[in-house]
Image (cartoon, coloured by chain):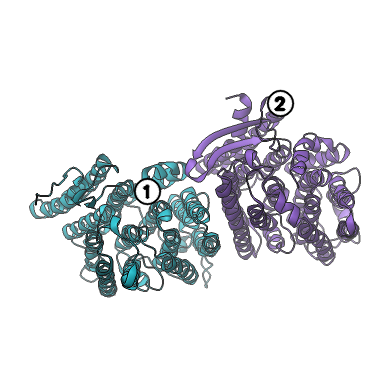
Chain colours: A cyan, B purple
């Protein structure tokens, strides 16, 4: 037996991501200054992205047993690693003002974020089921803590919302991981396949076992993308989590789940199950979002609905992976913009608040209003959010191309339901102040006093500008993304 | 790139860039910029017909395809079959010119108002509508079709009447419901033909019968919502009643035409077999729209609502013309489109002027306009008579020849439809005369200022002149339409 050769170059993105976590930890220990910690995470994140691009998508894998490898660079993996790194840096930027206030210990926060990023990178490159599930767990595990990591200043009203959100998330996630592992085990017992490229549909007397395994795997991973009926944790968790962490949950964490699901459904037949999940997810997500009165819950339900569109593409199997991946990237960029605006409009450390708190916000802060309209229009799939329009066209194109016209119809009709709440919130941003019930000498002054215009921290502004520019650039040159994915 | 290609791109790019500039500048210079941009956009539009002389050099491999005066074709997103393919021919040019003209009139009308957002939105609308008329790529057509949705919502919701939110929401959801069918339709066509290039697709090349049926059904629903075709019209009266004057003008003048233009160019063009199959249904619905629109108008008590419902009837004539699938009918539809844009644009400007002065649009509360404001009453009388289709004015040709085309088509069904449409035309006269009797004649119940501001004359007079011009010389619009229409009809089975 010969020793396995390891191609360290292709592992560079992983080294960079894991190294970032270590670097952050060391920075916290040695320098113990917030700026050093933030700097370490930013530099590490950018290095991860650069390493992923340098390694590229066509290198042969490593940790191979025969022809099957456990670490497989691919264009999709490369794009995913870049997106994960970007999201991590972006979410850090959104967190900086509240971390400066001390709502969470900066060192621990950044370390956990870097660990989560490492998990995301692993999911993209995973070549076997164990690596995949370990990657997904590494992505989620730090998030249990991040959701609950909330300190309160003396005298500040202590809330247990984040702790209870954390426990909800933890319990559901653990159960879902157990289900996914059981599925992987059953499938292995029936087919003997562990490497993704050897996954096959079951045959012979063990076929039912293999099918059950695949179904359990899909269901376990569907928890991660909050697919209906496995979604109930998401709104509660998003609402309880600090805003930037909610942003991470609905972007990076969801992207990880999508990549893991894509790895499974592109190799084995789970079309019926995924199709049913897709229809339920988008329909229920959109319908419930119509009734929401709180900003973060609305975003949570809308991101559930968006996951439905991605699942619809995944129901095509291998043919839909590119469309699902493209949609996910368009979606996470727009979602990051939306959360970024919410963070910018709220005081540092505050929650998302009620929708009524956003009345007239677009008049007070025209740029933030424009960014949120861009994001919502994109999520609804309409210009000026061209990125979102192309996302929707991509999915519908893939569905019709593969003979799933009915599913394309469901996606398209859901877009109409979705527009109803996106347009409601966007219009609210430009609604004039409601006349107060009592007579007031200067209503404008009262409005300014009750709805103060908060200064936008520079770093949040920077993240927003960068994310919006990426959204606009993807809107005008979506081919860049399509090229990067193949 | 020739100068004509530059002009072609400028028709779409100038308003889009202008809108951005207007949004960024402070209010007063922004309004001036907006007016200037909408006026400058007329220059490339005026330039485009001169490209026609070189028509015969643009050789098309597809015999049924349009002979474009000039075109620009740049690959944009190959993964989605999307090319940035703009082109202009005799079918699209009159509508593009109408778009440019109405936008320029509307921005000029707003010069003295406060704020600049409305002007910016009008420019975005212009870019979207002109882009729709100029697109020769199906996905690009869909993209431009969607561009107008949110700006029009904002125009109604931001500057409309008392019940504007509900009307705006109804507009945006209804029309998005229509455009998802457009998305499904264009993607179906693009996927099965392997290209989204309209110039290649026109004539139904490369699509089998089943695909054409499916595609035409999807596209027809999409365009029927936009046009709107009875019974999918219910968003229109609310949107019109609540929209500000300029919003109504653009909505009736050119936005609805995206539906009828789309039906001719994309629906009939791409899926002729489907169109042939669906023609009787379209014809019946179109005549139902004419009759229903006229009967509803007879019962209306509000000025803008009445004009809005009259649009349902007029678009019914346009759709009847299309449904006959003959050269005469299609040309009547194109002419009807332009005439309706001019006349209803004028009517909405006048209705806005009356509502601004009287602060009510209720017919019962108006009256005696002839005595209190004779010029206004004269203009309204002119527009109403043009709209009811008096020969010699623009409204006549489209409606008369839609009926003629239906008679020519022959057979019991089409003859019946022609008779019913003619009856509908008579009813149109009835309700417009009722409108005039209520508003201009009778005792003066309300005193309103008779002076007409300069900006109002500026906005109305080009429409009055063009209504006369098109009425007297319909070839102004039809000059270059017979060849493309004949090509379309020849592609039919």
| Quarter of the view holding residue B369 | bottom right
Count all numbered tags in the image, as a single digit.
Answer: 2
Q: Is residue A394 left or right of B383 when viewed as pictured?
A: left
Q: Nearer the viewer, residue A208 or B473?
A: A208
Q: Is residue B115 visible?
A: no
**Label ID, residue A467:** 1
**Element carrying mark 2:** helix
Q: Nearer the viewer, residue A479 or B121?
A: A479
Label 1 crowd bin: few (<14), some (14–19), many (20+), radius 10 Å:
many
**Chain identity of mark 1:** A
Residue at the location (73% across, 36% down)?
Answer: B90
**Element carrying mark 1:** helix
Residue at the location (91% across, 45% down)?
Answer: B391
Q: Position of residue A62 (x, y in %)?
A: 20, 48
**Chain identity of mark 2:** B
Q: Is residue B99 left or right of A113 when viewed as pictured?
A: right
Q: Nearer the viewer, residue A321 or A241?
A: A321
Q: Position of residue B469 (x, y in %)?
A: 84, 37
Label 2 crowd bin: few (<14), some (14–19), many (20+), radius 10 Å:
few
Observer-side mark, 1 or 2, equals 2
Q: Position of residue A287 (x, y in %)?
A: 50, 70
Residue at the location (77% across, 35% down)?
Answer: B483
Q: Is residue A227 visible?
A: yes
**Label ID, residue B56:** 2
Q: CA distance from mark 1 to mark 2?
A: 48 Å
Q: Is residue B431 left or right of B104 when viewed as pictured?
A: right
């Amino acid at each position: 037996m010969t020793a396995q050769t390891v191609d360290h170059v292709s592992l560079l993105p992983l080294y960079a991501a894991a190294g970032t976590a270590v670097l952050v930890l060391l920075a916290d220990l040695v320098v113990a200054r917030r700026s050093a910690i933030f700097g370490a995470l930013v530099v590490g994140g950018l290095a991860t992205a650069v390493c992923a691009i340098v390694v590229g998508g066509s290198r042969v894998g490593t940790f191979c047993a025969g022809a099957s490898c456990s670490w497989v660079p691919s264009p999709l993996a490369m794009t995913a690693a870049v997106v994960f790194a970007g999201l991590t840096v972006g979410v850090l930027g959104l967190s900086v003002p509240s971390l400066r206030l001390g709502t969470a210990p900066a060192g621990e926060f950044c370390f956990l974020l870097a660990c989560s990023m490492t998990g995301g990178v692993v999911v993209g490159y995973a070549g076997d089921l164990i690596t995949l599930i370990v990657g997904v767990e590494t992505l989620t595990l730090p998030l249990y803590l991040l959701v609950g990591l909330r300190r309160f200043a003396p005298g500040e009203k202590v809330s247990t919302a984040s702790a209870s959100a954390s426990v909800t998330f933890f319990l559901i996630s653990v159960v879902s991981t157990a289900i996914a592992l059981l599925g992987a085990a059953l499938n292995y017992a029936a087919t003997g396949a562990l490497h993704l490229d050897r996954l096959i549909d079951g045959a012979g007397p063990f076929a039912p076992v293999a099918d059950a395994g695949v179904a359990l795997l899909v269901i376990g991973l569907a928890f991660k993308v909050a697919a209906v009926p496995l979604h109930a944790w998401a709104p509660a968790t998003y609402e309880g989590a600090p805003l930037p962490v909610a942003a991470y949950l609905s972007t990076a964490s969801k992207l990880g789940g999508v990549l893991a699901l894509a790895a499974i459904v592109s190799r084995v037949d789970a079309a019926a199950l995924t199709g049913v999940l897709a229809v339920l997810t988008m329909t229920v997500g959109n319908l419930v979002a119509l009734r929401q009165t709180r900003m973060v819950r609305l975003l949570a339900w809308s991101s559930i609905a968006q996951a439905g569109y991605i699942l619809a593409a995944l129901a095509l199997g291998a043919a839909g992976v590119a469309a699902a991946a493209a949609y996910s990237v368009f979606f996470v960029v727009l979602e990051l913009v939306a959360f970024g605006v919410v963070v910018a409009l709220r005081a540092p450390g505050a929650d998302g608040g009620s929708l009524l708190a956003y009345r007239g916000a677009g008049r007070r802060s025209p740029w933030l209003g424009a960014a949120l309209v861009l994001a919502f229009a994109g999520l609804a799939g309409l210009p000026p959010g061209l990125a979102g329009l192309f996302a929707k066209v991509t999915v519908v194109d893939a569905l019709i191309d593969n003979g799933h016209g009915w599913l394309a119809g469901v996606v398209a009709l859901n877009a109409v339901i979705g527009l109803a709440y996106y347009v409601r919130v966007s219009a609210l941003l430009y609604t004039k102040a409601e006349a107060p019930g009592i007579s007031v000498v200067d209503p404008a002054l009262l409005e300014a006093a009750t709805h103060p215009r908060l200064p936008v921290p520079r770093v949040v502004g920077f993240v927003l500008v960068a994310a919006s520019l990426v959204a606009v650039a993807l809107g005008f040159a979506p081919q860049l993304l399509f090229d990067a994915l193949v | 790139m020739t100068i004509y290609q530059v002009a072609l791109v400028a028709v779409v790019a100038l308003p889009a860039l202008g809108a951005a500039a207007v949004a960024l500048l402070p209010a007063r210079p922004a309004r001036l910029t907006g007016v200037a941009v909408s006026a400058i956009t007329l220059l490339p539009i005026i330039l485009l017909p001169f490209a026609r002389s070189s028509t015969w050099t643009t050789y098309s491999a597809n015999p049924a395809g349009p002979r474009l005066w000039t075109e620009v074709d740049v690959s944009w997103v190959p993964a989605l079959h999307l090319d940035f393919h703009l082109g202009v021919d005799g079918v699209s040019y009159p509508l593009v010119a109408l778009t440019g003209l109405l936008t320029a009139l509307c921005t000029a009308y707003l010069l003295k108002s406060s704020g600049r957002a409305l002007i910016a939105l009008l420019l975005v609308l212009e870019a979207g509508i002109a882009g729709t008329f100029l697109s020769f790529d199906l996905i690009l057509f869909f993209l431009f079709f969607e561009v107008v949705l949110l700006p029009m919502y904002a125009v109604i919701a931001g500057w409309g009447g008392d019940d504007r939110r509900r009307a705006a929401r109804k507009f945006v959801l209804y029309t998005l419901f229509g455009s998802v069918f457009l998305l499904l339709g264009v993607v179906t066509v693009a996927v099965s033909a392997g290209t989204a290039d309209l110039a290649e697709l026109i004539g139904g090349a490369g699509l089998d019968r089943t695909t054409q049926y499916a595609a035409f059904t999807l596209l027809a629903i999409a365009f029927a919502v936009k046009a709107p075709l009875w019974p999918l019209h219910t968003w229109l009266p609310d949107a019109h009643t609540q929209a500000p004057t300029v919003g109504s003008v653009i909505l009736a003048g050119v936005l609805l035409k995206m539906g009828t233009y789309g039906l001719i160019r994309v629906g009939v063009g791409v899926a002729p077999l489907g169109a042939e199959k669906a023609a009787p249904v379209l014809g019946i619905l179109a005549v139902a729209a004419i009759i229903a629109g006229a009967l509803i108008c007879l019962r209306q008590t509000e000025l803008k609502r009445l004009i809005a419902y009259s649009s349902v009837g007029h678009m019914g004539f346009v759709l009847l013309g299309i449904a006959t699938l003959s050269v005469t009918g299609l040309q009547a539809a194109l002419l009807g489109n332009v005439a309706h844009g001019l006349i209803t644009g004028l009517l909405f400007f006048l209705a806005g002027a009356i509502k601004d002065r009287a602060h009510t649009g209720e017919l019962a509360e108006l009256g005696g306009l002839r005595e209190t404001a004779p010029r206004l009453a004269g203009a309204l009388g002119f527009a109403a008579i043009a709209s009811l289709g008096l020969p010699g004015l623009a409204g006549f040709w489209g409606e008369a020849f839609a009926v003629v085309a239906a008679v020519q088509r022959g057979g019991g069904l089409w003859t019946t439809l022609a008779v019913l449409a003619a009856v509908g035309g008579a009813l149109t006269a009835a309700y417009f005369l009722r409108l005039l009797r209520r508003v201009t004649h009778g005792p003066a119940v309300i005193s309103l200022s008779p002076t007409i501001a300069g900006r109002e004359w500026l906005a109305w007079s080009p429409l009055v002149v063009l209504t006369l011009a098109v009425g007297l010389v319909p070839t102004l619009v039809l000059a270059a339409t017979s060849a493309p229409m004949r090509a379309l009809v020849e592609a039919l089975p």
